[in-house]
Image (cartoon, rainbow, N blue to C red):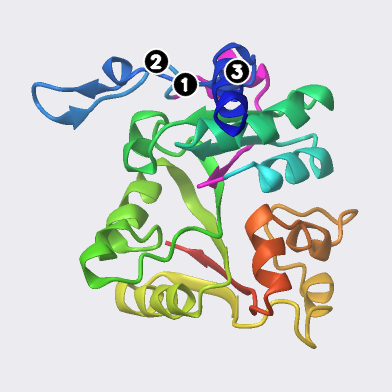
């Protein structure tokens, strides 16, 4: 039954109006082994959202809890959840359709190819929520806050665009702090215990660039993904980092 449900979800995402699942030939040259720009690159506002509002990416979005949560809180902004797992994307896409959130869309692709889908400066902000920390040294190139990926994000982020990392992995948190220092990124905020005694400071300092005076900063950070709920229940501390690459 589980496999059948999974197949049904894959079928749903192929027809959902808020999911884009591009075949490889639309953005990757197999002969040369390199990606090229997809037709949507530079056209998300005009062709998908039909407005000129800022675009925020959630990378490795899983079930899309952050994309949907932020979409509800900020109707004046556009949100794109990116993940390769269509079975996971289904949950967020279904909720966004049911809630008529026209400012939430999902892109099913590997983050390795992210530069193929957006033009320079097209993205205002990036959220990375509970990615696989890839702790083994032979997996270091797959860490989503490593220089190889950050260099890709910089190609599509507007100048001074902010990256947020929320994770339960102390390893990935410390790795990211080291990357920020080594490569001269601008650290705006970091904490190894997001929900600790100083959580109220996020309302006081208004640290998140996505917020406005009428939306407390805490409301964004309180959005919890499936994995965050799981890790919190196990007693894991949740870390948070905000920086400009």
SS type, badge 1: loop
Q: Which residues are magenta?
A: 42-61
The furthest residue to the right:
214
Q: Residue 102, which numbered label?
A: none
Mark 1–mark 3 CB contact (< 8 Å): no
User: In the rendered view, does 166 fall on the left or right side of 132?
Assistant: right
SS type, badge 2: loop
Q: Which residue is mark 1?
A: 21
Does the magenta portion include 87?
Answer: no
The C terminus is located in which quarter?
Answer: bottom left
Q: Which residue is mark 2?
A: 39
Q: Nearer the viewer, residue 58 or 95?
A: 95
C-alpha separation, residue under disc 2 versus residue under disc 1? 13 Å
Q: Which residue is mark 3?
A: 48
Q: Residues within 10 Å of mark 1 (few under 14, many from 20)?
A: some
Please identify the quarter of the rendering in which residue 32 is found.
top left
């Amino acid at each position: 039954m589980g496999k059948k449900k999974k197949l049904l979800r894959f079928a749903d995402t192929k027809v959902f109006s808020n999911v884009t699942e591009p075949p490889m030939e639309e953005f990757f040259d197999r002969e040369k082994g390199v990606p090229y720009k997809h037709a949507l690159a530079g056209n998300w506002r005009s062709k998908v959202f039909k407005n000129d509002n800022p675009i925020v990416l959630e990378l490795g979005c899983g079930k899309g809890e952050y994309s949907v949560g932020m979409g509800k809180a900020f109707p004046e902004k556009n949100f794109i959840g990116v993940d390769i797992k269509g079975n996971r994307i289904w949950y967020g896409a279904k909720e966004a359709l049911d809630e008529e959130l026209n400012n939430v869309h999902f892109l099913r692709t590997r983050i390795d190819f992210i530069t193929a889908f957006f033009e320079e400066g097209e993205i205002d902000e990036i959220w990375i929520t509970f990615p696989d920390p890839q702790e083994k040294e032979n997996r270091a190139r797959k860490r989503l806050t490593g220089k190889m990926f950050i260099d890709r994000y910089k190609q599509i982020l507007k100048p001074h665009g902010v990256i947020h990392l929320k994770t339960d992995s102390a390893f990935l948190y410390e790795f990211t702090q080291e990357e920020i220092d080594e490569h001269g990124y601008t650290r705006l905020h970091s904490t190894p215990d997001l929900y600790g005694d100083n959580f109220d400071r996020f309302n006081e300092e208004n640290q998140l660039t996505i917020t406005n005076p009428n939306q407390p900063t805490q409301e964004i950070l309180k959005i919890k993904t499936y994995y965050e709920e799981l890790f919190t229940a196990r007693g894991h501390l949740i870390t948070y980092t905000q920086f400009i690459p």
